Amino acid sequence: MALSSNNSALTIQQTDHASFTWSYKQWKMYGDADSFTTYDSLKLRIDESDLNGSTQEQIKTRLSLVKHYINNAVYSEALEKIDETIQIITDQHYEGSEYAECLFLKLQIQLRIQSSKNATEATLTALQGHFTDSLNILYERLGDFFIKEFKIARAAHFYQEAYKLSDSLNLKKSQKRLAVVLSELYTWYLSEYNKAEKYYRHVLKNSSMDVDSKHIVSSYYGLGHAYHHQEKFDEAIKAFEEILAYKTEDTDSLNICYTYNCIAHTYSAMGSVDQAVSSAQNAYRYALTLNNSYIIYSSTLIIGNISQEQGKIKEAIKYYEISKEAAINFEDPNSLAEVYHKLAVAYKKRQDFQMALEYWEKYDKCKNSVEADKLAFDKLRHKHLDKKSQHTIAIQQVKLGHLEAEQLLFRKQLKKQNTVMLLSVTILGLLGFILFINRKKNHKISQINENLITSNCQLQNAKERAEILMREVQHRVKNNLMFVASLLDMQSMNLENREARGVINDGKKRIEAMGLLHQNLLYQEEHPIDIKMKTYLTVLVDNILRTVEKERKIKIDIDVENIELEVDKAMPIGLIINELVYNSLKHSLNRTEELTISISLKKEKYLALIVKDNGQGLPDDFHTKKKSSFGIKLLEILSQQLGGKMQISNDQGVRFKLLL
């Protein structure tokens, strides 16, 4: 998304002097200051203008030097020159746009170096008073500044204020331009889709197809995405179909191709299978003519997923193979890993275990590559944070330099006073003594700060190495568990004894539950030794449901608080839930009514785990069989490992309770 500002001149009416014109280039923080590239040439121009030039020339030459200082991050000198320029404007009673430009440049520097809140607010208040009836222009420029700093939320705040003021001043063009920017910010950067809707509707309401066809098409596209993310699927479909209804140069084959792909994704999310397949096929047809690998990958993946859900495995494999070739073409390892995983699952359902194993290995290799790239990115990110810390230290040094400059100016002013010589000498001696003491204190403080920075860097490096090592261990454990599960799966296919096969399958499921926990640890960005139980149990239950025939009526309710547990507690709880859910499914094979299983994990005074179903309940001889049941023994061992006591009872089905 490109965010641009109107580069045409902006005329701002002032109440205290004549109107003046500002171009966008005068506002920008970066870029060349006039045609000068060296300090010497700029300072020479200042000297010449002070001798022979007008007041306007004196001001403009100083502003050129200020912009050059800003471009090179020499902020203390820039602030000094700005104050000097403002003094000239005040002394000469000069009326022009340069005073407002000085204030705006000063505000930008204060925001960059994080000056005190009072100083920044004072500059902003002065600007607001200067603009009077044109605050919308000021707020829009502040939004442009924060966009350059990539502080999107603050930019959106100032754009929104400019939008409100433009509305109150009935500035239709300005309001529409701001609505375009705000709708894109809230959709693609801030993910605040409900706010984005308002601004998309404003653009569409105030646009005509003859003049603003590009804005209309992009607004319907963004509005469709906003609706989709809010699960307003019907409205999303209508928005996307509006794009197809417009036959303009902005609805070319590429736009139509992307639009059909979005419609397919929306229908797929709605569960409308036929419409999803039809839209995906349209997208695929356009993508072939355009040779667009991404849309080919995305559309065929949708068709393959739907075919697999319908049990059409051969057709699913066909589309997955097309999707695979497209993913290879646009070189996205994440997309390629997803297709490899889909192919492994499809071939496994087809009982072609050799191909399934081959694609599983490709999937694992591809994911390893992605994880390696992620680890490399993390290292770069940490290096960037170190540089950011150095930048913060540099800013503090700039502030110190500015304070020292102010002290020097104060001392110069003292020398100019016509006071008694003895009093002047006494005061200067006293000031010198104070400065000497302060410098000694500052030197000690700087040494302490350097030691703290060194210690922090060492701690940060140790933390990074520990996290990388932890992720590597989790990765190896996960791979080994999945490999053991695959071996058990292949071994079970060679067993004719049904009971032995069942025992091996039960063991495989328990190993997969443990492997899922390590996979969850591996992809957590923070706290790689704690498990987010809500995410882990949701994925665990989803994996169990994938193994159940679609004809069975099964409903699983998960009521889990946002709890994080250590691996030593999370793994036994996951194995207990895995054992109980599979046990409920096994004992309800011949059940015609819907089987409901509820899982609750909450923490008040104690951590309470409750698993309940509406099945046939415990048999009369349960306590007799309990001693010989491996599943019950496993539950007792896991409960003891957690330091809790389990209770199993009949309550319109089986009810398991564990308090920790």
Image (cartoon, rainbow, N blue to C red):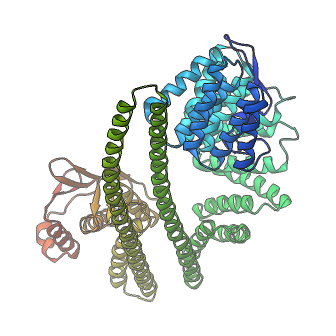
Compared to residue 312, the image places residue 444 above or below, namely above
Q: Quadrant of residue 45?
A: top right
Instruction: Please tell me which residue is depicted at 61% across the width and 36% down the height of the picture.
Output: 81
The one of 619 and 292 positioned closer to us in this rendering = 292
Q: Position of residue 98 (x, y in %)?
A: 69, 26
Q: Position of residue 379 (x, y in %)?
A: 49, 68
238 vs 582, left or right, is right
394 vs 654, left or right, is right
Q: Position of residue 125 (x, y in %)?
A: 53, 22
- Circle count: 0
Q: Position of residue 157 (x, y in %)?
A: 55, 31
Residue 227 is at least partly visible in this image: no
Query: Which residue appears farthest toward the front when viewing the image?
Result: 421
Compared to residue 493, the image places residue 552 above or below, namely above
Q: Quadrant of residue 460?
A: bottom left
Instruction: Please tell me which residue is depicted at 72% across the width and 18% down the height of the picture.
Output: 171
Instruction: Please tell me which residue is depicted at 49% across the width and 47% down the height of the picture.
Output: 398
The one of 440 and 465 positioned closer to us in this rendering = 440
Q: Quadrant of residue 31?
A: top right
Query: Which residue appears farthest toward the top when viewing the image?
Result: 15
Compared to residue 443, the image places residue 2 above or below, namely above
Q: Quadrant of the C terminus?
A: bottom left
Compared to residue 345, the image places residue 405 above or below, namely above
The one of 184 and 582 positioned closer to us in this rendering = 184
Q: Quadrant of the N terminus?
A: top right
Instruction: Please tell me which residue is depicted at 69% across the width and 69% down the height of the picture.
Output: 331
